[in-house]
């Protein structure tokens, strides 16, 4: 493959457009990890076979795209450009769609989205509430291109920003655009990207060395999959962003640190880097300028703490990925002790758009006014992975400043089955739980931090009223205990101690003094830990203590778990009124703890009961009660 | 290498000014403010692991808790207020100590610190409580000492979080472990001990016992006595200068006001803090690097280079002895000598001779190719060095050494052979090393009677003789010139370094009967030998061990034409003042000697007459010393081993007997 020029770029783009115009429609099958797990590739293969058999190959083409975002309803297929979206596809649906929609021109009603409001079918993707409220900058190409075809990316304007930057702009002009945009790091810390780049440029200048550039794709939060989806859906947007960044700061070499547990993202990234190299968009003298830059992949081995920037760079050096004090920032002494800019996947994916549309345009999106200082607001959009007790699980991109309420209830479709939303956990395991009565909080870096949580990389876990908040705190602390690297005392010992106390509380052995002790130890961990992971690790305990103190008190003083979750504090009984002696629950009880003849009242032997709750699930007459 | 910027801050209300980059810990230490720590150790470096050293920093009403051991105070911190005792800090330390105490309730250092902070019984019980008194507290000192001091990676942490523990890879004995014991000294709880010695000595228990005591003594005393681990042997420059022993301008003088610029004070700033010892297990690690040095001349001009930094004799030889008192020029000469493969002592002494010849007018600038070869001419010294490496110009002549220069200057430039012999500091064809021996007869012998030429590898007796006057008689001097060369030869035979023997000495050494020998260490060395070889060896056996080799070396010299009395002659510059100027610079001392020892009343004599009288006396003394030493060594007046001695040592081989018969 030969290097392409800026003119070639336009030609590829046009060729790509005219190719797609040749077809009546493109069938965009979502091939994000969620849909792939639900047989998306098998469905795609069947679709291709069906088209071939029915001689429709020249009229329709099948494209496997990256994550569409509407994961709860996968596998998905979008008929483009008309916009019909089919959901929850099964292998059998393939021939139906081909016969009825493609051949007979009658879209298949049964496979369309049902609005929870009026239970009518919504044929077009753009009309679905989940998509309506979103604003796509980072995910601009999601579900629209084949992520394994660089020409598809170019066809949607890809690499134009890089071409523009290299041919028309000086490095400091790029820096200025990024500064003007006010963009803050999407990895969780929210440090202004422009200031970071500027500090790196000045320390590299002082020492007269080329800085390094790193993309952090070591996404490790449970329930978070933003970065993975971006790379799976649109790897070139990250590569282009990195190349522009490299030109701005003077880097010659960049790295993507990506988890080995993301095989699909890794494979697509590898392919994309190779394609970019083949086109000369990475490598020596890009677009025949003096700018040379290449990207290497470093695979992470799965330690959660390696997502912390100093630990990540240590791991890149081939050492154990443990953090060290960052009193001297990585922009001054990072990878191999040289100035290094590290930004998260999502931040990099924003850069081409900022260059294309201008920093000013970007700064107007989002909350606050960043025209004076990036610290005075949160500009742009943010991608969230919306999970938990919510109707529309998936990946969403919204402007900063949107309220949690809008995300949860409008985009997310609210908490299902008539339950109430109790809390939203943001910021990953070391984030915090925000109670339902604060759902009107705008989502931006500073508000979430003030509320005792944090933006983190963008995980949003919705919890309904069946969740016990003490148990939730214990769950996250347990995770962090396992993932603490153990280097510094407060994080290593303090978390184990908090874990012990929370276990005691959930077992009904808590004492009133535990509450004060929990917050006391948490404060010390927060203040004294070596890295930001440790600094934020007590958040699950602190934020639940702050907003759900009554629930702790119920466990400690009344020895009750109001949500009915903590096994030591609950008892399953069978109500005389409702039980008709159907005999289902004794059959399902794994411990043979339920006795009673048919048609007679069943009873639970408390000494045998392990409180698994199966009896309650299987009872059709609401006869099993928990207290 | 400009001066660092200073930053003004306050610590606990006290104003102070520190160099940019100084840590809070070091800044507080200067103000005698104590900050507790478990993992911090000055030689290992700051780890930031234990979090006991936290302090609270405040600037513009914003406060933050940081670890004092590794928080660098930088220019941006101007006006920073540091509190090492704020309520938050005390509370944080208490809580961290409580965590530690709950896990390791019986470890003395933790108990002690907890008590100091009033932490009694922890409020909670730790699920992993370890009752052991010497439990590992995961501070990381051992791991980082192995990495940073020893440059090894023998031990490290395995597992993460609360499961973390220090292990050798796969929990197996790491065959690469040197058995240096450093991890054991730095461990604050005694959790690590040496079990096996990979070198397979005859008696590993004894070796461990002696090795641990010796290393521990070095670790404890070097920072107090010499700081060799920080400044190398540069600490000797001010000492030698004070005692009139630092060679200045081709050994004419023994001190100079400029010496202050080229000693430990200057190099402490220049040396890189990293390890540069000969051997990774060395606790002295006297060698140091000047990192990112930019030479101003020669092929590396303007580039950044690493210089295996100057030691005492390089500084004296390539600095003061050339009249050069610029530490960067000395570093540059050091760098190019290393790069070109030229010995710094030979270069310095040969260069000093050439300079003095030039200053005296024995050679002129036609001989030097136009170079003004005066003392202190740094550019000329560097130019000669580059020429020497290229084999060009006058540098090629200097590079052939003093013995050849003397011959050539007489033949080619009509120089005065007598003067050249007096000031040409060589014996047996080797250039002198860098101590002034004029006032110590014993050391004149130490140099002159050394088998491989005038260097102190065999004996360094100046303080003993001149400063402490511990060997007034010829017999005593001869005894020293027997014992010390033999003992020092033994180090060479075993491949050992001598610095741990007599540069770092026991604290009570001065009060022992023979402080110069450092008998406690001599005992240790005999134990080392016993432990390694399994041959029971006493201190006197060490001397016998060497004696055979030493006599063999003398016989070898003899065979090569260098082993007789005449070859033990030395230039008069090493014995006494050659010139009137030299005499006058120490007139009181010399006049006194004439009066008290020679028995001549100097009053009324001209300096020239006095100088000649002193010379006659001192040269005769040196000959008497030769007689005494030869006798003690079992040699004849010609300086050759007697048949009797050879038989006694069991080296009466046919070839040896024939060699002696021929003489």
Image (cartoon, coloured by chain):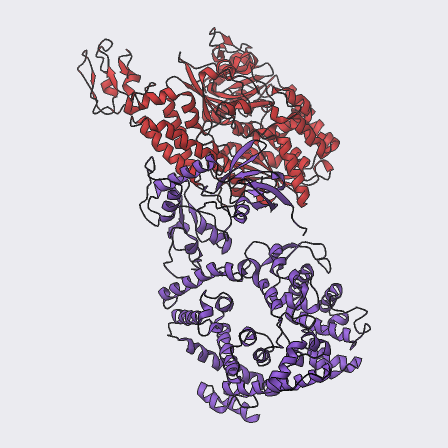
Chain colours: A red, B purple
**Residue B343 appears in the picture as rendered:** no
**Residue A95 appears in the picture as rendered:** yes
Viewer-proximal residue among B66 and B176: B66
Which residue is drawn at the image coordinates 51% and 40% (left, top)?
A: A311
Which residue is drawn at the image coordinates 41% and 43% (left, top)?
A: B159
**Quarter where residue A372 is shown:** top right
**Quarter where residue A615 is shown:** top left
Q: Which residue ends up furthest to the bottom in the rendered image?
A: B661
Residue B96 in percent (x, y) is at 41, 39
Residue A361 in percent (x, y) is at 67, 21
Viewer-proximal residue among A427 and B49: B49
Q: Viewed as shown, does residue B390 lie left or right of A473? A: right
Q: Is residue B227 above or below residue B363?
A: above
Q: Viewed as shown, does residue A105 lie left or right of B178? A: right
Q: Is residue A42 above or below residue B295?
A: above
Instruction: Classify the position of the C terminus of chain B by image quarter.
Output: bottom right
Q: Viewed as shown, does residue B186 lie left or right of B555? A: left
**Quarter where residue B325 is shown:** bottom right
Q: Is residue B639 above or below residue A70?
A: below
Residue B233 in percent (x, y) is at 57, 64
Residue A433 in percent (x, y) is at 44, 23
Viewer-proximal residue among B12 and A588: B12
Q: Is residue A394 above or below residue A307?
A: above
> How many numbered discs?
0
């Amino acid at each position: 493959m030969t290097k392409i020029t800026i003119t070639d770029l336009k030609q590829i783009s046009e060729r790509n457009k005219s190719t797609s115009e040749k077809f009546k429609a493109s069938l965009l099958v979502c091939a994000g990890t969620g849909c792939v797990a639900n047989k998306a590739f098998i469905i795609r293969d069947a679709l291709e076979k069906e088209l071939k058999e029915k001689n429709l190959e020249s009229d329709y083409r099948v494209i496997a795209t990256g994550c569409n975002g509407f994961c709860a309803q996968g596998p998905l297929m979008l008929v483009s450009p008309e916009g019909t979206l089919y959901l929850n596809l099964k292998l059998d649906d393939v021939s139906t769609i081909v016969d009825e929609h493609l051949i007979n021109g009658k879209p298949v009603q049964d496979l369309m989205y049902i609005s929870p409001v009026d239970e009518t079918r919504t044929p077009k993707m753009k009309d679905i509430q989940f998509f309506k409220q979103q604003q796509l900058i980072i995910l601009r190409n999601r579900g629209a291109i084949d992520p394994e075809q660089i020409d598809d990316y170019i066809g949607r304007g890809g690499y134009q920003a890089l071409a523009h930057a290299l041919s028309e702009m000086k490095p400091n002009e790029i820096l200025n655009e990024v500064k003007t945009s006010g963009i803050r790091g999407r990895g969780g810390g929210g440090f202004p990207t422009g200031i970071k780049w500027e500090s790196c440029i000045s320390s590299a200048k002082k020492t007269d060395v080329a800085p390094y550039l790193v993309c952090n794709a070591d996404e490790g939060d449970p329930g978070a999959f933003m970065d993975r989806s971006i790379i799976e859906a649109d790897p070139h947007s990250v590569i282009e962003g990195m190349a522009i960044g490299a030109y701005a700061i003077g880097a010659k070499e960049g790295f993507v640190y990506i988890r080995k547990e993301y095989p699909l993202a890794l494979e697509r990234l590898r392919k994309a880097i190779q394609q970019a190299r083949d086109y000369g968009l990475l490598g020596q003298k890009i677009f025949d300028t003096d700018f040379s830059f290449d990207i290497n992949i470093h695979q992470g081995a799965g330690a959660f703490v390696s997502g912390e920037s100093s630990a990540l760079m240590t791991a890149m050096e081939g050492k154990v990925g443990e953090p060290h004090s960052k009193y001297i920032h990585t922009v001054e002494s990072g990878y191999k002790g040289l100035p290094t800019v590290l930004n998260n996947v999502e931040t990099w994916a924003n850069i081409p758009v900022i260059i294309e549309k201008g920093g000013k345009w970007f700064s107007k999106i989002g909350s606050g006014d960043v025209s004076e200082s990036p610290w005075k607001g949160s500009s742009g959009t943010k991608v969230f992975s919306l999970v938990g007790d919510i109707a529309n699980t998936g990946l969403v991109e919204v402007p900063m400043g949107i309220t949690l309420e809008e995300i949860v209830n409008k985009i997310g479709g609210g908490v299902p089955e008539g339950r109430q939303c109790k809390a939203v956990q943001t910021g990953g395991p070391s984030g915090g739980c925000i109670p339902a009565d604060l759902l009107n909080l705008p989502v931006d870096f500073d508000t979430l931090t003030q509320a005792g949580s944090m933006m983190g990389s963008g995980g949003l876990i919705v919890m309904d009223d069946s969740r016990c908040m003490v148990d939730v705190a214990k769950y996250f602390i347990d995770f962090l205990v396992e993932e603490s690297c153990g280097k510094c005392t407060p994080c290593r010992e303090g978390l184990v101690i908090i874990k012990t106390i929370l276990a005691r509380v959930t077992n009904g052995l808590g004492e009133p003094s535990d509450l004060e002790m929990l917050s006391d130890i948490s404060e010390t961990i927060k203040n004294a830990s070596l890295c930001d992971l440790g600094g934020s690790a007590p958040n699950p305990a602190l934020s639940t203590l702050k907003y759900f103190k009554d629930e702790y008190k119920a466990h400690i003083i009344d020895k009750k778990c109001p949500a009915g979750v903590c096994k030591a504090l609950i008892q399953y009984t069978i109500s005389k009124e409702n039980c008709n002696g159907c005999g289902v629950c004794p059959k399902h009880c794994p411990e043979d703890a339920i006795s009673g003849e048919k048609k007679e009242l069943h009873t639970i032997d408390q000494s045998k009961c392990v409180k698994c709750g199966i009896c309650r699930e299987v009872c059709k007459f609401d006869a099993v009660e928990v207290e | 290498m400009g001066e660092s910027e200073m930053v003004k801050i306050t610590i606990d209300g006290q104003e102070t000014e520190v160099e940019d980059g100084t840590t809070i810990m070091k800044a507080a230490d200067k103000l005698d403010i104590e900050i507790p720590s478990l993992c911090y150790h000055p030689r290992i470096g700051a780890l930031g692991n234990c979090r006991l050293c936290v302090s609270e920093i405040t600037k513009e009403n914003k406060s933050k808790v940081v670890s004092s051991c590794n928080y660098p105070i930088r220019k941006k911190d101007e006006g920073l207020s540091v509190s090492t005792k704020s309520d938050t800090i005390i509370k944080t330390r208490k809580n961290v100590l409580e965590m530690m105490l709950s896990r390791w309730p019986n470890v003395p250092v933790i108990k002690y610190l907890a008590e100091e902070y009033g932490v009694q019984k922890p409020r909670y019980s730790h699920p992993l409580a370890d009752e052991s008194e010497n439990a590992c507290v995961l501070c990381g000192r051992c791991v980082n000492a192995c990495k940073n001091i020893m440059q090894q990676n023998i031990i490290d942490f395995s597992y993460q979080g609360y499961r973390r523990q220090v292990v050798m890879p796969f929990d197996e004995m790491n065959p690469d472990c040197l058995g240096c014991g450093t991890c054991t000294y730095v461990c604050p709880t005694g959790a690590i001990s040496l079990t096996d010695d990979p070198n397979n000595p005859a008696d590993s228990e004894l070796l461990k016992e002696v090795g641990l005591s010796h290393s521990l003594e070095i670790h404890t005393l070097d920072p107090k006595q010499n700081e060799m681990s920080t400044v190398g042997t540069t600490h000797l420059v001010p000492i030698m200068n004070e005692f009139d022993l630092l060679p200045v301008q081709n050994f004419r003088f023994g001190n100079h006001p400029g010496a202050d610029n080229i000693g430990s004070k200057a190099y402490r700033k220049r040396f890189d803090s990293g390890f540069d010892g000969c051997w990774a297990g060395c606790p002295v690690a006297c060698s140091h690097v000047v990192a990112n040095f930019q030479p101003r001349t020669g092929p590396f001009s303007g580039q950044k280079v690493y210089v295996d930094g100057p030691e005492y004799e390089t500084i004296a030889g390539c600095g003061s002895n050339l009249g050069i008192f610029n530490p960067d020029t000395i570093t540059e000469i050091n760098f190019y000598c290393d790069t070109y493969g030229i010995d710094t002592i030979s270069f310095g002494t040969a260069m000093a001779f050439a300079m003095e010849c030039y200053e005296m007018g024995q050679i002129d600038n036609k001989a030097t190719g136009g170079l003004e070869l005066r003392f202190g001419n740094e550019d000329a010294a560097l130019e000669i060095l580059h020429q020497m490496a290229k084999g060009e110009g006058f540098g090629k002549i200097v590079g052939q050494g003093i013995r050849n220069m003397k011959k050539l200057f007489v033949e080619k430039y009509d120089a005065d052979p007598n003067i050249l012999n007096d000031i040409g500091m060589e014996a047996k064809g080797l250039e002198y090393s860098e101590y002034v021996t004029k006032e110590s007869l014993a050391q004149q012998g130490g140099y002159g009677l050394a088998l491989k030429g005038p260097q102190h590898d065999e004996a360094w007796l100046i303080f003993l003789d001149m400063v402490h006057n511990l060997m007034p008689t010829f017999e005593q001097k001869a005894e020293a010139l027997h014992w010390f060369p033999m003992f020092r030869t033994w180090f060479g035979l075993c491949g050992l370094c001598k610095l741990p023997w007599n540069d770092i000495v026991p604290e009570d050494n001065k009060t022992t009967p023979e402080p110069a020998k450092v008998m406690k260490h001599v005992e240790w060395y005999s134990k080392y030998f016993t432990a390694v070889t399994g041959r029971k060896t006493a201190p006197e056996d060490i001397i016998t061990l060497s004696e055979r080799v030493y006599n063999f070396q003398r016989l070898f010299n003899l065979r090569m034409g260098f082993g007789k009395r005449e070859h033990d002659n030395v230039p008069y510059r090493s014995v006494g003042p050659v010139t009137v100027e030299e005499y006058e610079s120490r007139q009181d001392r010399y006049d006194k000697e004439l009066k008290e020892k020679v028995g001549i009343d100097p009053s009324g004599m001209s300096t020239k007459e006095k100088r000649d009288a002193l010379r006659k006396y001192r040269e005769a003394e040196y000959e008497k010393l030769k007689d005494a030493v030869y006798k003690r060594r079992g040699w004849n007046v010609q300086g050759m081993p007697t048949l009797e001695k050879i038989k006694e040592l069991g080296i009466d081989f046919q070839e040896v007997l024939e060699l002696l018969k021929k003489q």
